[in-house]
Amino acid sequence: MRRKPVTLVTGAGGEIGHGLIGRLAAAGRDVLALDVRELPADVRAQCAHAIVGDIVDRNLLGRLVSEFEIHAIYHLAALLSTRSEFTPETAHDVNVGGTLNLLHLAVEQARWHGEPVKFMFPSTIAVYGVPDLATKASAGRLREDQFLFPTTMYGCNKLYCESLGRYFTRHYRQLAHEREPSGVDFRALRFPGLISAFTLPSGGTSDYAPEMVHAAAEGKPYACFVREDARIPFMAMPDGIDALLRLEAAPKAGLRRVVYNVTAFAPSAFELAELTRRHFPGARITFEPDLRRQGIVDSWPADTDDAAARRDWAFAPAYDLERTFRDYLVPNVKARYTGAQ
Ligand code: AKB
């Protein structure tokens, strides 16, 4: 009896999953969605299969082997940086234990069907930790091997999971008598703050950018929790999804790295507020920094160097800051709240 060939998407109901699943389905791929909550109806409709469950549940994942033939995994499930600081031990269980469970699942799947399993992993700029603002300013765009001293549980989790993925891909059971490859083809992107027009941000420290725009579109005042001069890299969600799909499709022979930086634009919070006011003239945006969340943002890079991604798999974002607002955010966020475009 042939099992159903699928692409597994964890955290399917989240910000990335909302757009990614539509792209996978449009490409003719059967999506097996896994999330701890029921999927929104529009997302569920694009999935071949959907399971409500937790990636820390090894029994659940073990049962997937009997029913599904998984050829690729998009592991989106995670507790983000701010939420993880309230429950660091739970964040470790989900972000690290869940990822290890899925890597084990990928090894089992590859053994069963004899093909490598591509494991797509959204890492983050939270893996970086610059010590102070003077260093942040002088360091500029960080390469993948610089300042890897995360100050959040989420950043620690993601940096370790990058190493786990590299181990499974290149060094798995290296001392075994009968050594055989794991079959796991782990590929990771260090995402900047992702800005989505269609989902509300959930527990991230970079959320001030989308929160500001969504509040303006709803006609609500917004007290920004970082300073006006706070600066980190961002990307429009469509470019983030394109980057994941392009990296998955890239020939392995051309990939000199397992983990890649990707970025698109790096505005200050003031520049984001000015652009929001330009598109929403009545926007009431104030700045009331939360010094602890500000401390996290200050430890993140002003921008990252994505030359390796552009060299190895032709990464090229389509949306700069102006186009993100003009063509993506403003028309879609307006439609979400007012029906107008
Ligand atoms: C967060 O703010 O935690 C995430 C991220 C930058 O990885 N959006």
Image: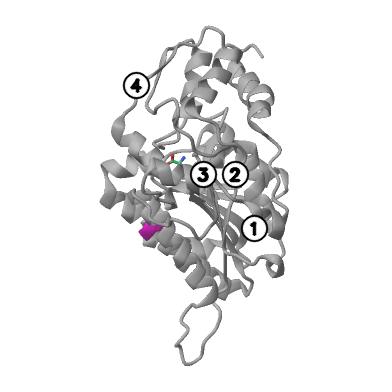
Q: Nearer the viewer, residue 274 or 127?
A: 274
Residue 171, position as x, y percentages in the image? 50, 78
Residue 322, position as x, y percentages in the image? 66, 26
What residue did someone put label 2 on?
263
Distance between mark 4 and mark 3 Cα atoms: 33 Å
Distance between mark 1 and mark 2 Cα atoms: 12 Å
For the residues bearing labels 1 and 2, Cβ distance under 8 angstroms: no
Q: In this view, does 323 lie to the left or right of 106?
A: right
Distance between mark 4 and mark 2 Cα atoms: 27 Å
Amino acid at circle 3 = Ala
Tell us which disc is closer to us: 2 or 3.
Answer: 2
N-terminal-most mark, 2 or 3: 3
- Taking the image in four quarters, ligand 1 sits in the one at top left
For the residues bearing labels 4 and 2, Cβ distance under 8 angstroms: no
Residue 263 visible: yes
Task: Say which mark, if any, is on residue 183.
Answer: none
Task: Say which mark, if any, is on residue 12.
Answer: 3
Could you tell me which residue is drawn at 57 percent across and 27 percent down?
Answer: 197
Residue 165, position as x, y percentages in the image? 49, 65
What residue did someone put label 1 on?
308
Distance between mark 4 and mark 1 Cα atoms: 37 Å
N-terminal-most mark, 4 or 1: 4
Mark 1 neighbour class, 10 Å CA radius: few under 14, some 14 to 19, many 20 or more = some
Tell us which disc is closer to us: 1 or 3.
Answer: 1
Mark 3 neighbour class, 10 Å CA radius: few under 14, some 14 to 19, many 20 or more = many
Image quadrant where one finds the N terminus: bottom right
Residue 21 visible: no
The boundaries of the magenta stretch are: 95-99
What residue did someone put label 4 on?
288
In the structure shown, which secondary structural element does the residue marked by tag 2 occupy?
loop
Q: Is residue 9 left or right of residue 322?
A: left
Is 274 within the magenta?
no
